[in-house]
Image (cartoon, rainbow, N blue to C red):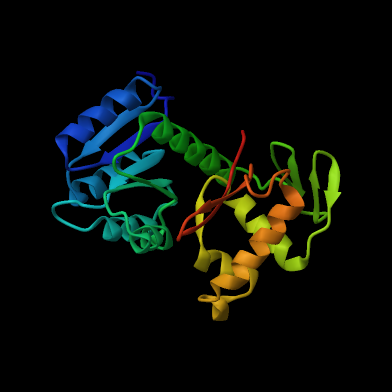
Amino acid sequence: MSPALPLVLLIEDEPGIRRFLRVTLSSSGFRVVEAACAEDGLKKAAAERPDVVVLDLGLPDRDGMEVIRDLREWTAVPILVLTARESERAKVEALDAGADDYLTKPFGAPELLARLRVALRHALRASGPQEPVFTTGDLRIDLGARVVTVAGREVHLTPIEFRLLVTLAKHAGKVLTHRQLLNAGWGPEYDFQAHYLRVYMAQLRRKIEATPANPRYLRTEPGVGYRLVFEG
């Protein structure tokens, strides 16, 4: 395989899932390096410098949350978590620890591949020069001029609405937790005021979505947070 293909580090202890993911990823334009435990995964992350990490939380030697924190001490590589833990708390904890996204087992190959592509696009944008204008679909955010348009029509946002939208845009495709967005909009003293966020996200949807009840851009991750869809 060409070394130009994106490299995925798969840290997963279940042989059946590793085999499924190896075949799926290899046939979809990815190179794959595998590890069956946390320690081996961390060593291969340092040695191989992957483009994205796919991480199971239930590893035999260490909890996956510790692996996320260890990786975040030295790398910004996108981390996509695979988890059988369905609780909202576990998902929020993984995202707050530094994961970029998560999939709950069982999952489908098309969704996994789509989320990997989004993670790679986000990493590419983050590593390059900061663009003054963010665009997804008909939504356009001019960061310098602080102007937001939808299909060419200017949308007037309050300062807090603009901060929330810009924060989501800078992490487009990534789930941001309620806590992360409350920090961005109001500051750390508002960490647990989730009702503020619900009100402002509803206002944002009314302003930028053609159908607020069925949003194209601002998606809810129930019990966890929000995601701005990136249409590359």
Instruction: In the displayed orientation, state which residue is furthest to the bottom.
Output: 189
At a point 33% along the width and 23% down the height, the residue shown is: 26
Q: Say left or right for 51 vs 144.
A: left
Q: Is residue 116 above or below residue 23?
A: below
Q: Nearer the viewer, residue 18 or 215?
A: 215
At a point 74% along the width and 49% down the height, the residue shown is: 208
Quadrant of the frame with the C terminus: top right
Q: Say left or right for 142 vs 232.
A: right
Q: Is residue 20 above or below residue 141?
A: above
At a point 51% along the width and 43% down the height, the residue shown is: 123
- Asked where in the image residue 63 lies, by quadrant, the reply is bottom left
Q: Is residue 25 above or below residue 198?
A: above
User: Is residue 207 at least partly visible in the picture?
Assistant: yes
Query: Which x, y percent locates residue 144?
Result: 79, 54
Query: Which x, y percent locates residue 16?
Result: 17, 32
Query: Which x, y percent locates residue 86?
Result: 31, 54
- Asked where in the image residue 27 lies, by quadrant, the reply is top left
User: Is residue 184 at least partly visible in the picture?
Assistant: no
Quadrant of the frame with the N terminus: top left
